[in-house]
């Protein structure tokens, strides 16, 4: 592993467990075996390390989703919503340290005074919400999802799933036991309630024409 990547990996681990403010450069140097001068060769300061971690997460979201989606077979937009929920839970499990950092207070305190941090956080969350919104839009096109406001519905769905991730991270609840109910809730919230009626009318027309 390259030294720069090792520094980022160690920093992610330390920031997720101790928080940004309570992680010293001396600790980071000890964790990586790199002198502080070496760390500063790769990064301007500790904040630069933090922003790089956020930047990497942002850049990994869509490629990870495309890879995840490529291994699945979905029939409708409503099915895609289910896969989007599963994907977010999957990302939160394989990148637990990164999600722990996202759920800390510091990134949002920094975003109030650092435009780049604010832009990174916004783009990270927008990328996730976009995945849900695209699934909802697909469902509206194929008729499996009702005529709900796509962005607002996507944000509500995302907030629900992200809350479950927080429960797991803070050991408040075993979200695995809630998975089926979470999927069912998402489907009930979005499904096209006119679909059974439309299907029945189509069936009647087919029988009459036959």
Image (tube, grey):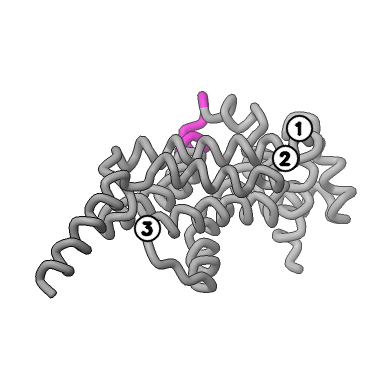
Query: Dividing the image into 4 quarters, which one contains the C terminus?
Result: bottom left
Magenta stretch in the rendered image: 112-119
Give the spatial CA distance, label 3 vs label 2: 27 Å
Give the quarter of the image for residue 139: bottom left
Q: Residue at x 75, y 51 (%)?
A: 39
- The residue lying toward the viewer, choosing from 138 and 125, is 138
Looking at the picture, does residue 44 appear above or below residue 75? above
Question: Main SS type for the magenta part?
Answer: helix
- The secondary element bearing badge 3 is classed as helix
At label 3, counting other C-alpha atoms closer than 10 Å, the crowd grade (few under 14, some 14-19, many 20 or more) is many
Asked whether 95 falls inside the magenta stretch, the response is no
Residue 172 shows which numbered tag?
Answer: 1
Q: Where is residue 24 shown, x and y percent of the image?
A: 81, 36
Instruction: Please say if the residues under marks 1 and 2 sit with CB atoms less than 8 Å apart.
Output: yes
- In the image, which is nearer the foreground, mark 3 or mark 2? 3
At x 47% / y 40%, what residue is drawn? 157
Name the quadrant containing residue 160.
Answer: top right
Counting from the top left corner in percent of width and height, residue 124 is at 50, 45
Residue 168 badge: 2
């Amino acid at each position: 592993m390259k030294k720069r990547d090792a520094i980022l990996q160690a920093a992610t681990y330390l920031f997720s467990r101790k928080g940004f403010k309570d992680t010293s450069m001396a600790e980071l140097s000890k964790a990586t075996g790199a002198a502080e001068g070496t760390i500063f060769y790769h990064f301007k300061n500790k904040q630069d390390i933090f922003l790089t971690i956020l930047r990497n997460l942002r850049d990994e979201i869509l490629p990870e989703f495309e890879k995840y989606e490529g291994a699945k077979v979905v029939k409708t937009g409503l099915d895609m919503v289910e896969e989007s929920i599963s994907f977010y839970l999957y990302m939160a499990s394989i990148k637990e340290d990164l999600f722990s950092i996202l759920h800390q207070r510091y990134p949002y305190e920094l975003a109030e005074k650092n435009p780049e941090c604010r832009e990174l956080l916004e783009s990270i969350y927008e990328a996730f919400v976009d995945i849900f919104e695209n699934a909802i839009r697909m469902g509206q096109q194929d008729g499996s999802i009702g005529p709900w406001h796509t962005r607002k519905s996507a944000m509500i769905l995302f907030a629900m799933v992200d809350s479950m991730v927080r429960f797991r991270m803070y050991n408040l609840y075993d979200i695995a036991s809630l998975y089926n109910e979470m999927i069912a809730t998402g489907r009930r919230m979005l499904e096209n309630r006119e679909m059974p009626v439309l299907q029945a009318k189509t069936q009647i027309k087919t029988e009459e024409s036959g």
